[in-house]
Amino acid sequence: MELAIGQARAVFNALVGLLPEKETEFRERLDQLEAEFGDLHGRLSAVADRIGHQPVLFSHPVYQYLMQGYGLNGRSLHWEPQELPAEEQWSELDRLLKAHAAAWMIWEDEPRPDVVSRLQELGIRSLVFRPCGNRPATGDFLNAMVENLVALERAFPPSTTARVTDVRCAGGTPEFGSARKWCGD
């Protein structure tokens, strides 16, 4: 959210430069937006803490900001949500799962039902987190991020860190506590 707040501040500064008489109004709106982004950041941080070091998969390499900003243990594939992955891609996934035993795959849009079913057979659940590389079809960036956050909160409720069944280990023992170390990662 730091980048979004930085962009909002840049827009604020530009608007104040153009319309200095409206600075108070712009400041009020900026303060409100910063508070909303701060709330989102806090909620995302809480979800990331619950995820801990559980391995997750991303359908595309567009989630680096999420992985780095919130310390997620993710690996990216290059799967299109409306395309059936080729058998070579499924084989690549099988190899990846041996070293990165993920139970969740995060998509930028709704994946095909048959792909979701096959992933479920592998013990992988799917959720949509739209990265908003472009303007959302409806609403705005903030609305889209709230929808993304709600999907993450549903997938990783507060009890997540206490349930070992949510973690598929490829060798190692899950550990709990402040170290947030999972499955030897």
Image (tube, rainbow, N blue to C red):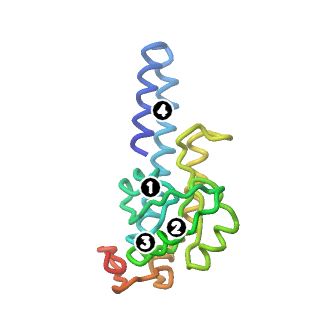
* Residue that label 3 marks: 96
**Residue 60 in the image, given as x and y percentages of width and height:** 50, 55
Q: Tag 1 or tag 3, which sits nearer the N-term?
A: 1
**Quick check: 172 left or right of 139?**
left
Query: Type of residue at label 2?
Result: Glu
Q: CA distance from mark 3 to mark 2?
A: 12 Å
Say which element carries label 3: helix
Q: CA distance from mark 4 to mark 1?
A: 18 Å
**Quick check: 1 left or right of 118?**
left
Q: Tag 2 or tag 1, which sits nearer the N-term?
A: 1
Q: In the image, what residue occupies the spot 51% across and 74% down? A: 103
Q: Residues within 10 Å of mark 4 (few under 14, many from 20)?
A: some
Q: Tag 2 or tag 4, which sits nearer the N-term?
A: 4
Number of the label disc, if any, that sits on residue 30: 4
Q: CA distance from mark 4 to mark 3?
A: 43 Å
Figure check: 58 above or below 19:
below
Q: Do the CB atoms of the residues marked 3 and 2 lie less than 8 Å apart? A: no
Query: 145 and 43: which one is in front?
Result: 145
Q: CA distance from mark 4 to mark 2?
A: 48 Å
* Residue that label 1 marks: 42
**Quick check: 74 left or right of 143?**
left
Q: In the image, what residue occupies the spot 47% across and 73% down? A: 102
